[in-house]
Image (cartoon, rainbow, N blue to C red):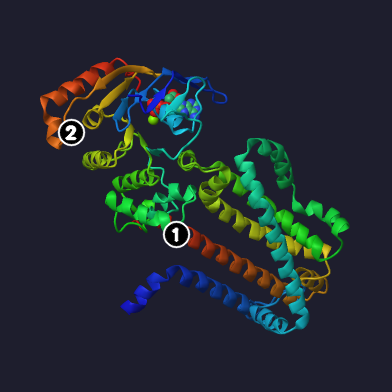
Amino acid sequence: MEPYIRSTDITLTFTPKNRDAVTALKDFRIELNSGEFVSIVGPSGCGKSTFLNVLLGLLKPDKGEMEIGGKKITGPGVERAMVFQEFGLLPWRTVLANVELGPELKGESVASRRPRAQELINLVGLTGFEGHFPHELSGGMKQRVGLARALATDPEVLLMDEPFAALDAQTRDLMQAELLQIWDKHKKTVLFVTHSIEEAAYLSDRVIVMTKRPGRTKRIIKINLPRPRGYEMRLSPEFNDIKLDIWNNLKDELNARE
Amino acid sequence: MNRYLSQYRENEEPILGWGFIVLFLLVWEFIPHVVTLPKGLALFFTTPYHIGAKLVEMSTSSEVAFHFYVSATEFVIGLGLSIAVALPVGLVMGRFNTLNAMFDPFVTAFNATPRLVFLPLVVLWFGFGIWSTVVIVFIGALFPLLINTYEGVKNIDRVLVNVVRSFGANEWQLMKIVVLPNSLPYIIAGLRLAIGRAILGVVVGEFFGSDQGIGYLMAAAAGNYIVDVVFAGLILFMAISLVMTMAVKKLEDRLSRWRPEQVKTF
Ligand SMILES: Nc1ncnc2c1ncn2[C@@H]1O[C@H](COP(=O)(O)OP(=O)(O)O)[C@@H](O)[C@H]1O
Ligand SMILES: [Mg+2]
């Protein structure tokens, strides 16, 4: 089967004013099958967010191309949506208005976007908070809004940039389980960036380990654990073996400074 | 007793604020009764009672009403024009570096120059009267608004821009959905400054470049040593400043409902 998303070797160099140029990605390539859950782990600063932004259509690589469903990516598109690390909620908009952002920008009428937004708010468990502003929500609730917002345009691909990094451990476990449920039910393709080996192993079909900057693929590790995955699975020896495998690939890339 | 105390606690700020004004007026009123002022000073001295009486008298005079109308018109047109120019120019300068590079030296130079030095030229160009003052008001109010709007746009949250662009927003939608709301606190702060400058512009313009308006009345009265009228005009301007500032505060409260309330601490 043709992969749903694929790229040629992507290279991207930042040339900030008054600073040295930084090559964030060098010959990084990726293939994702439709409906797959893939995680990327790598040392911080290795270019993970940069890559997501290329895929999202916000950054143009210096070299290389990306294709989605056979079509070249030249900018943002409705088949892709991102869940941002620091939530990225518009603070002056209510939960409802934040969730409706995508459909609103697509020019959908209130009558058609409102019921769907409400449905998604219910889905992520925020019923009753439609009129709240972001500052009135906890971190976990904010990220639920971020997730609902990303789902609102009904994208094929969900890009997630360390979405749970700012959450406490319990909230994080809860959100992971809910994300898996949503993924299973709505058949999205997910590309998930995380710092947590445990999180990557628990959620993914495959884990891509990146090298330190300039980032390229170091190893791709297949996670052959049965689904649905429960919390107990995390305590099994197989799960620990997978974590160890990821760690062994990652540890040489980690810089003592970071 | 306790009830009064708790009522006082709730309204401590306004009670203290107004209380002090009342105290100030009382002391002022009684100065001539307590001390004998030297002759030279007594001539130019007046008390709150006389000023109040003058204000009441002026408020019924159709001539004063006309001058007030002139001043208000200058203020509204000048400030309105400055808002209409400063907002779009500030937004565009903040978004497009090329335009900023073009306009920035111009804005900086103009803003650093005291507005009074434009007055002779403005009077030559726009004539003695209302339009000169309007221009002075406009120049005064323009720059704080423009510079604040620009700063607000510059202080935009990159993440929010990315979020909105990722949903396919064009530059216009980006302005409407992120840039403008994000800049609003800056714009409001600029508006507050601009109102002060605009009132100053009315006064200065009418003092030196007009034969109409409350500022002109004051200047003319001062020339004839009619101190009551000068003070009455002063109070009128103070009152207008106060009302406008309060209106901006109301506007700010309305527009910032989404912001966290100040949390009470010990
Ligand atoms: N807009 C930018 N301008 C300059 N350098 C950048 C920019 N964005 C990212 N970088 C640099 O590129 C490298 C990769 O960044 P990023 O993709 O954010 O890493 P991470 O893997 O932690 O998400 C880092 O060294 C970062 O400093
Ligand atoms: Mg990152």
Q: Is residue B137 visible?
A: yes
Q: Which chain carries label 1?
A: B
Does residue A254 lie above or below B122 as drawn?
above
Give the quadrant of ligand 1: top left
Query: Residue B236 versus residue B92: which sits nearer the camera?
Result: B92
> Which residue is the site of mark 1?
B257
Q: Is residue B61 above or below residue A154?
A: below
Q: Does any atom of ligand 2 lie closer than 8 Å to the CB of label 1? A: no
Question: Mark 2 packing: few (<14 Cα in 10 Å), some, or many (20+)?
Answer: few
Whole-number angstrom distance, CA of label 1 to CA of label 2: 45 Å
- Residue B41, image quadrant: bottom right
Q: Image check: B140 left or right of A134?
A: right
State the image quarter where residue A67 is shown: top left
Residue B23, how many percent across, how many down? 54, 74
Residue A95's disc number: none
Tell me what residue is drawn at x 69 percent, y 65 percent.
B76
Element type where label 2 sits in the image = loop
The answer for which chain carries disc 2 is A
Residue at 36%, 78% in the rendered image: B4
Q: Is residue B29 left or right of residue A161?
A: right
**Residue, disc 2:** A227
Which residue is nearer to you in this view: A15 or B164? B164
- Identified by mark 2, the residue type is Arg
Quadrant for the N terminus of chain A, please: top left
